[in-house]
Amino acid sequence: MQNADVSVIIRNAGERTSDLCLGLVSEQVPPENIVVISEFPFREAARRSYEIGIELARPWTMCLDADILLRRNAVQMLRKWALEAGDCALYVQGSILDKIFGRPRRAGPYFHKTSLLSLMLEHMPAEGVSLRPDTDAAMQLATSGYSRPQHDVVIAVHDFEQYYRDIYRKAFVHSHKHLEYMPSLELMWQRLAGQDPDYEVCLWGLNDGRDFKGIVSHDVRCFPRDISDRLGKNDWKEKDPLKPTKDRSWDVDNLIAQFYRTSVLADYKFRNQN
């Protein structure tokens, strides 16, 4: 199989797409190269990912959150970019089609040069200092000449088919982490809420996040894992676990292609919703 020199660390926080994420990665990387971890908070997950990559000692280490679903050949594409980037590239990234943002954006899997992971560990900010500890470590190292090339090619989708509780948490965190985008996102969520309840839940998270004056954390343990009371007010219930099938009805490449045809995420519906 291709990509035998790549280790993949999947960071699992109980996402609805965890099994599907693993299945898609297993089509591109030998299964024995994949490690799934469940570490909290986010900084600890990032730290442990780097440590495992160093221990496995393959040339490349990809860190992937379980709410990201890769398109076909995504790993091969990242590996090609990493080879082209040179010795001073800490990692490379592509872009993701982000459901909550309603558009592609530069983010997603971090494809690391394993020999530089120790530098990332050394420069990671302390817990509670940053909502982006991995990005902040790379930005510190940029002053010493290290780079983190990013590409506009969409290689994955993000936050599709997640539990309502996780969508609520993401919007709550985004209301602080991405404050500059909130006015436009709120308008989009209001426009799409009647077509897709995910966006109604985004509005709940945004409004609660605005009212919150404390320290915001990525840690899923800081948020309710059961929002059935809130859902019940709309006669909704939490989504059932996702059951990936072999019929490719959730095909990531088709989802991305459909977005570029319509530019409306709400037009896309997974067939395998329950």
Image (cartoon, rainbow, N blue to C red):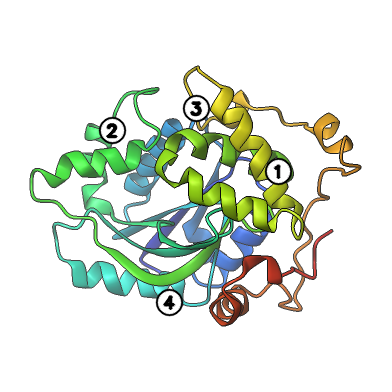
Q: Which residue is mark 1?
A: 201
Q: Amino acid at mark 2?
A: Met
Q: Which mark is residue 124?
A: 2
Badge 3 vs badge 4, beta-carbon distance below 8 Å: no
Nearest to the eye among marks 2 and 1: give it.
1
Q: In the image as oriented, which residue stretches furthest toward the right?
A: 235
Image position, residue 51 (x, y; %): 36, 40
Q: CA distance from mark 3 to mark 2?
A: 16 Å
Measuring 36% from the left and 66% from the top, which residue is drawn there?
5
Badge 1 vs badge 3, beta-carbon distance below 8 Å: no
Q: Residues within 10 Å of mark 1 (few under 14, many from 20)?
A: many
Nearest to the eye among marks 3 and 2: give it.
3
For marks 2 and 4 on the same chain, the one whose residue lies earlier in the sequence = 4
Callout 1 secondary element: helix
Q: Which residue is mark 4?
A: 2
Q: Say left or right for 39 vs 255.
A: left
Instruction: Find residue 84 and report its image quarter.
Output: bottom left
Q: Amino acid at mark 1?
A: Val
Q: CA distance from mark 3 to mark 4?
A: 37 Å
Q: Which residue is mark 3?
A: 217
For marks 4 and 1 on the same chain, the one whose residue lies earlier in the sequence = 4
Image position, residue 178 (x, y; %): 43, 41
Q: CA distance from mark 2 to mark 1?
A: 32 Å
Nearest to the eye among marks 4 and 1: give it.
1
Image height of 184 relative to 176, above or below: below
Instruction: Find residue 262 and report its image quarter.
Output: bottom right
